[in-house]
């Protein structure tokens, strides 16, 4: 069943500039600038005063869901340019000490389970990775880039061909500072 109007309003905080042009939403704040294309033929996104309004007339189930999705993306963009996102990971080993380092846009894991070749994980976008002892901290303004980088690092240390109950070595996400 169609509802006559599905509307979400997002308040723009002080010190943040936002613009919407041809389905491209741009948010600028103290930490940087994010841009994202949010387009659907039945959904209208516009900026009025200090609000971004997302609405769909005679919306079906998928359009209603997309209105909520677009609102969530814009809220994450606003939070990213004001506070940023921080993921914390922990290096855990019991058999062989793991040596981790960052070179360019790659995270390199050496001596994982005594392997001679290093494992590598790709760093996405504009994220900053710092290693302090057994802690790995990933920071950035784009939530998707920070999360994908953390997932790549965690996936690079997946244990293969061994009993995962015994070999629990790896680099794991401990907290998502949202």
Image (cartoon, helix red, strand yellow):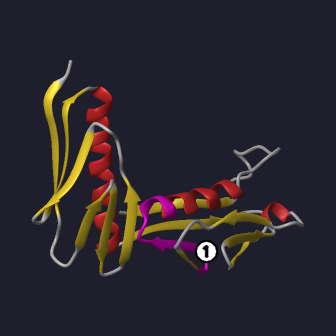
The number of numbered discs placed on residues in the rendered structure image is 1
Q: Residues within 10 Å of mark 1 (few under 14, many from 20)?
A: some
The reply to whether residue 93 is in sight is no
Residue 89 belongs to the span the image colors magenta:
no
Q: Where is residue 37 in the image (x, y as percent from the top left)?
A: 39, 55
Q: Give the range drawn in magenta.
A: 131-145
Residue shown at 17%/66% (left/top)?
12
Residue for badge 1: 134
- Give the quadrant of the N terminus: top left
Please tell me in which quadrant of the rendered image residue 86 appears. bottom left
- Residue 36's place in the image compared with 123, above or below, is above
91 to the left or right of 28: right
2 to the left or right of 141: left
21 to the left or right of 157: left
The residue most toward the front is 22
- Give the quadrant of the C terminus: bottom left
- Residue 74's place in the image compared with 126, above or below, is above
> Which SS class for mark 1?
loop
The reply to whether residue 23 is in sight is yes
Q: Position of residue 62 (x, y in %)?
A: 33, 30
Q: Position of residue 103 (x, y in %)?
A: 70, 79
Residue shown at 82%/67% (left/top)?
118
């Amino acid at each position: 069943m169609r509802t006559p109007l599905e509307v979400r309003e997002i308040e723009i905080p002080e010190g943040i500039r936002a613009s919407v042009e041809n389905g491209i939403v741009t948010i600028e704040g103290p930490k940087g600038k994010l841009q994202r294309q949010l387009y659907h033929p039945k959904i209208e996104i516009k900026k009025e005063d200090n609000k971004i309004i997302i609405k769909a007339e005679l919306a079906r189930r998928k359009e209603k869901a997309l209105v909520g999705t677009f609102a969530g993306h814009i809220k994450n963009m606003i939070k990213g340019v004001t506070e940023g996102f921080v993921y914390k990971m922990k290096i855990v080993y019991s058999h062989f000490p793991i040596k981790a380092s960052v070179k360019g846009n790659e995270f390199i894991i050496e001596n994982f389970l005594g392997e001679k070749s290093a494992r590598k994980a790709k760093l996405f976008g504009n994220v900053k990775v710092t290693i302090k002892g057994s802690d790995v901290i990933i920071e950035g303004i784009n939530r998707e880039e920070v999360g994908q980088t953390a997932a790549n690092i965690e996936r690079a240390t997946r244990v293969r061909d061994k009993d995962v109950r015994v070999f629990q070595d790896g680099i794991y996400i401990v907290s998502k500072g949202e």
